[in-house]
Amino acid sequence: LSTPSPADSPPYLWPLPAEFSFGNETLSVDPTVTLIVAGNGGGSLIIRAAFDRYMGIIFKHASGRGSLLSRIRFLKMVEYDITSLKIVVHSDSEELQLGVDESYTLMVSKKNEQSIVGAATIEANTVYGALRGLETFSQLCAFDYITKSVQIYKAPWYIQDKPRFGYRGLLIDTSRHYLPIDVIKQIIESMSFAKLNVLHWHIVDEQSFPLETPTYPNLWKGAYSRWERYTVEDASEIVRFAKMRGINVMAEVDVPGHAESWGTGYPDLWPSLSCREPLDVTKNFTFDVISGILADMRKIFPFELFHLGGDEVNTDCWKNTTHVKEWLQGRNFTTKDAYKYFVLRAQQIAISKNWTPVNWEETFSSFGKDLDPRTVIQNWLVSDICQKAVAKGFRCIFSNQGYWYLDHLDVPWEEVYNTEPLNGIEDPSLQKLVIGGEVCMWGETADTSVVLQTIWPRAAAAAERMWSTREAVSKGNITLTALPRLHYFRCLLNNRGVPAAPVDNFYARRPPLGPGSCYAQ
Amino acid sequence: AFEDIERLRIWPLPAQVSHGGRRMYLSGDFKLVTEGSKYGDASGILKEGFDRMLGVVRLSHVISGDRNSSGTGGSALLQGLHVIISSSTDELEYGADESYKLVVPSPEKPSYAQLEAKSVYGALHGLQTFSQLCHFNLKKKVIEILMTPWNIIDQPRFSYRGLLIDTSRHYLPLPVIKNVIDSMTYAKLNVLHWHIVDTQSFPLEIPSYPKLWNGAYSSSQRYTFEDAAEIVNYARRRGIHVLAEIDVPGHALSWGKGYPALWPSKNCQEPLDVSSDFTFKVIDGILSDFSKIFKFKFVHLGGDEVNTTCWSATPRIAQWLKKHRMSEKEAYQYFVLRAQKIALSHGYEIINWEETFINFGSKLNRKTVVHNWLNTGLVENVTASGLRCIVSNQEFWYLDHIDAPWQGFYANEPFQNITDKKQQSLVLGGEVCMWGEHIDASDIEQTIWPRAAAAAERLWTPYAKLAKNPNNVTTRLAHFRCLLNQRGVAAAPLVGGGRVVPFEPGSCLAQ
């Protein structure tokens, strides 16, 4: 048979673990494998739910868990090598914040003199490390079509793993095209397969305002239609769903630009009918609305980072609107000063609600020295903005548009993969200020029909860059070291129902060029 | 009447609909009741269908626990759905009654909606329609039904309303096939034509000849026997038949990977070796195994695009032809007819692609269903000859023709120029075909939908109620496309041909 046959190949794990060793034994996994928990956090509902979820993924073929064949096999007293999965979690805290310990150790071995039963063991400091371990365990399991059972090849496995960066994000944009809740959940689920851990939710933009804000209930009149909206409860459900998978949700409302949709419900927010963007900087009402939005969002989004946007602010409009011009003159402000004033005031509102602000890089480029020192700068435009930002003591998130903007369809996987967030930063203390990176799925041309095949598999290339050690992703010929594993991971995504597009096409989300195997396309 | 149609957002359009102008809300514990029903639901098909219906109506939105938020008294609350089914069996039989009647009362009336059907599968269609009457009110956070009271009497126009998927050109993982099946139910399609095997790969386990799936692309791109049974069961519980196809004697190169004796020679790997009894033993084994899983009364034996020049170019076959005094064309006929006999012996009725009719139509088993794809006049010829027919003319109903717009899918009339009632009764229905050369898990949904939905209405709705100008139903189809998206189906925008991407921001209602 054609390749790949898991038993003959290098470890098909994505992202590649930090440290691992393997052998050459093949072990069978009992479809009724039992969960054994230990440690202060082992009894967490997050662990139990994840175990059940992953067993459903691992034993998805009809001869798997719960099927008739499985019951017949049980009656025949078939002996399996792996009959239990032990998960040890040391901390009982389920707090999910930036920098949470996601490390884990995974051991898979046959019964031997030290153990009377074959076992797999995951040990982690937090439940979120255990989740990452479960994902790796699921990738070690493969259905064997000859024996019709799930096997683990190349045992015994000993994996010690942890992420390189604490922030490994994916942006989704629900303003340009509304994404139904189930689609957002499918995105979150697929993120967990690649061990990404922040969903950057660009909720609102100039085109539509889909989120319910109880304090200012007319804001979502800016939605495209009355069905293309998220209630407060919907957003909370998304946050809960993500947390169960170890994923933070960072919300973004972009101010003062990219906010035309706010005025559909509250026209006072527009400087005038012919000047609908940026928001009216002269009115306290504008900042009251921002404060109300942030107060409502604080009840939904517990993640410490909140994104205030601040990009692409075209302030010409302000100069052309009489009352704004008068306000500027009265304060002896230029429009750039007003832009700064707006962003800093929004920052203070966010900080007053115990958030740490994140802003796009233009705020740093324009008035970096005035930003709150806790600000996290998100790069997109200038490739060395992170170097500049960390040199000034700011933290930075890397999202270079030339390579990590997923709506740029002409970036093949290897260019995504070879993009290094720490380029040009040699000082270890400054490297720590790059908290990670993010791939951005802007929604102008991505709706429910194409968002997942535009995200995957290229987001996986970035995910490995952010998870695996720099040495592992930098050495060797990636056509040999990474491409076969990425093909395999793309097939794994497809097998789990995620519509990841072919890897080898130059342009993203293109159909397969012809018939063939997903391992070769 | 136009405005009435415009406000009716049900797809496919029911046969008879009337409605009022009131509003009802679904109770927080909306329930299924079955008093008076002869159907016991021992296998849970109805209950599962009801739960799925509630799931898609909620669209994963969180329903408010506050009953008072509906802002109305109890009289506008719908307590549940009363389902009465007159048949006690849940056997999924082809041609069985799929009709239903749905009554949703106005606030003055009793507080249960009523769904009557002959079979549980008609009831499933009724649940589907009910789901399209319901909308989640995002302000009150409850499910509402507008324009009550509703009176709907509905049944399909054609008994065969199919969708072909092709797992040989690209393997489709189980979850992908299941998602396709789920989406078919939303449009009330009822036959999944599974083109399992072709030249490129043989992904299915055949216990009688276990090396056949050595023709799979890889050891992990396969369906076990149990996988196939699971797909059939998953479809059956949703009222969908699975029509299995093995295409013979052409389109079968992959068979020889495991059994090279099936190839006439190494240089002639297609069509299958007509001279060898082993070939027919293998077909017999395949169909024997099929009969254990695929319970649909029909099996599809293909028979299309058979390039027989290879046979004459292979000395052994040439001698066999000479010995049996057959031309290549006659050997093609011999092969197809022998395969038909094998299928009949396993209790199947046969579907063949139209080339078999064109070449030797008078020799085909009289119960053969001819599957149109090439010729526009074929349907009339087939039915005039007394054989049954399924319409899939490639110009309009091939989904892999990316430049074919949804309007063409909608306007394609299966009866074409057939006016004779008896001939019309021989047209079982139609099928849209999702050939897989450029289709894999990443693009199958957006290539199928929404164009398949346009065909689905052509196959479901009475001819007199279909729009003469497809553009008149644009708004209703856009709404259905949005409904698919809300349910997690990656249906593409309507504008353009198939599988277009949105070229700018906007609402799914307008793209």
Image (cartoon, coloured by chain):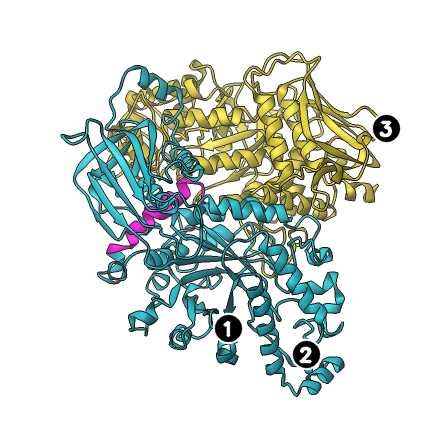
Chain colours: A cyan, B yellow
Q: Most prominent secondary structure in the magenta stretch?
A: helix
| Residue furthest right in the image | B108
The boundaries of the magenta stretch are: A481-501
Pinpoint the chain carrying mark 2. Answer: A
Pinpoint the chain carrying mark 1. Answer: A
**Dot 1 corresponds to which residue?**
A372
**Dot 2 corresponds to which residue?**
A317
Q: Residues within 10 Å of mark 2 (few under 14, many from 20)?
A: some
Q: Residues within 10 Å of mark 3 (few under 14, many from 20)?
A: few
- Whether discs 1 and 2 lie on one chain: the answer is yes
Task: State how far apart marks 1 and 2 are (Cα).
Answer: 27 Å
Q: Is residue B126 visible?
A: no
Q: Residues within 10 Å of mark 1 (few under 14, many from 20)?
A: some
State which mark lies toward you, 3 or 1. Answer: 1
The answer to the question of whether label 3 and label 2 lie on touching residues, with beta carbons closer than 8 A, is: no
> For numbered disc 1, what is the local secondary structure?
loop
State which mark lies toward you, 1 or 2. Answer: 1
Number of marks present in the image shown:
3
Image position of B60 (left or right of A456):
right
The first of marks 1 and 2 along the sequence is 2
**Dot 3 corresponds to which residue?**
B108
The residue under the point 83% across, 36% down is B22
Q: Quadrant of residue A326?
A: bottom right
Residue B386: numbered disc: none
The residue under the point 25% across, 32% down is A119
